[in-house]
Image (cartoon, rainbow, N blue to C red):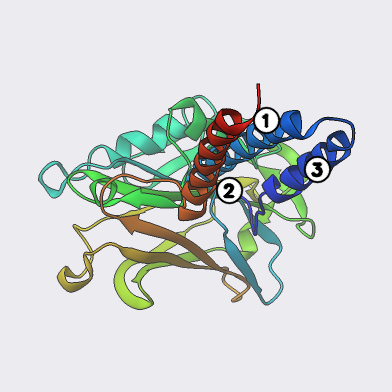
Amino acid sequence: MESRTKSTAPALMYSLARLMEAGFQTISDKIRFLVLFRYALGVAVLNLLVSGIGATARADVIVTPVGNPTFVPVDFNLFAAPVGTAANGYAEFFQTAPAILPPPNHLFDPAIGIVPGAPHSGPYNHEIGQGVAANGFIQSTTFTTADFSNGRGVLLTFMITAGPGSPIGSSPDFASGPIIPNTIFPISIHAQTFTNGAFNDDSGILSVQAIAGVEGQSHFPYFLFDNFDFTKPELSIPGDYEYRISVLDAQGNGYQIVVPFQIVPGRVVPEPSSWMMLATACLILVGLTYYRRQSPQ
């Protein structure tokens, strides 16, 4: 999940247009019209494909530093997955997390969550993303009401790692390397859900403690989910949602993180502009048919 991602489709379409313009100088009007149609149809299909990718693109995560943190949040992932219900204690959520970060590198403690497993070297900024992909979960910023109810939820997960300014020391993964030092623990993570700009749910504060026997940690993950089981009844509706998370160390340094997404009724469809492009291609097809009928044989 990347910050402020932009589509390359406009630049690609412009390049295609320039190539077509050069080619038009050497072909007849009739062939030019045929090529124009094929180009327009191709652009329409390309735009539909880009829109389809956009529907499952990684979220535009807004990360704002607070103070001078020496750790960094990385590998943001937003996706829908089974989480269970109140009746089974949300058992599926506690199955999803260890499936994404499985043994031996990570272990699952029912009382704490994911804890260090076998020592393994970094980088640690793709472990969660690889686990999400391996389990077939689809990254997205648009979800349906079915993804946010009846045993399913929208999960946000990311990794906290040692940053460029981190000290060197021992961790469960190595005898000497960049660490999040024990001296800045506990690290408090507070998550809230907002709907259409209004406060909707508070997931509480997770206090991540230091690990005894080492000087710090190389990395640790954070998992969050929400759904209509926890939101206010009057705000359990489709709309614009945000997960707002603060990650602060014992000295008050850290980050404010905002992850926007949408909950919509029904299934996700391409953007209206894509349908307009396809409609344009269809109109050109009608025009081509008329042109061919009217042209002298």
Query: What residue lies at 36% left-to-right and 36% top-to-bottom?
Result: 96
Residue appearing at x 49%, y 57% in the figure: 209
Distance between mark 3 and mark 2 Cα atoms = 27 Å
- Asked if the residue under mark 2 is in contact with the one under mark 3, i.e. CB atoms within 8 Å, the reply is no
Of circles 1 and 3, the one toward us is: 1
At horizontal 61% and vertical 58% (from top left) the residue drawn is 182
For residue 34, which numbered disc appears in the image?
1
Q: Which badge, 3 or 2, is on the more N-terminal residue?
A: 2
* Residue labelled with disc 2: 1
Q: Identify which amino acid the numbered label 2 is placed on.
A: Met
Work out how far the residue at label 2 is from the one at label 1, CA to CA, in angstroms: 41 Å
Image position, residue 122 (x, y; %): 70, 36
Q: Is residue 134 left or right of residue 175?
A: left
Mark 2: give few (<14), some (14-19) or many (20+) Cα within 10 Å: some
Q: Is residue 223 above or below residue 293?
A: below
Nearer to us: label 2 or label 1: 1
The residue nearer to you, when weighing 210 against 68, is: 68
- Can residue 156 be seen? yes
Amino acid residing under circle 1: Leu
Of badges 3 and 2, nearer the viewer stands 3
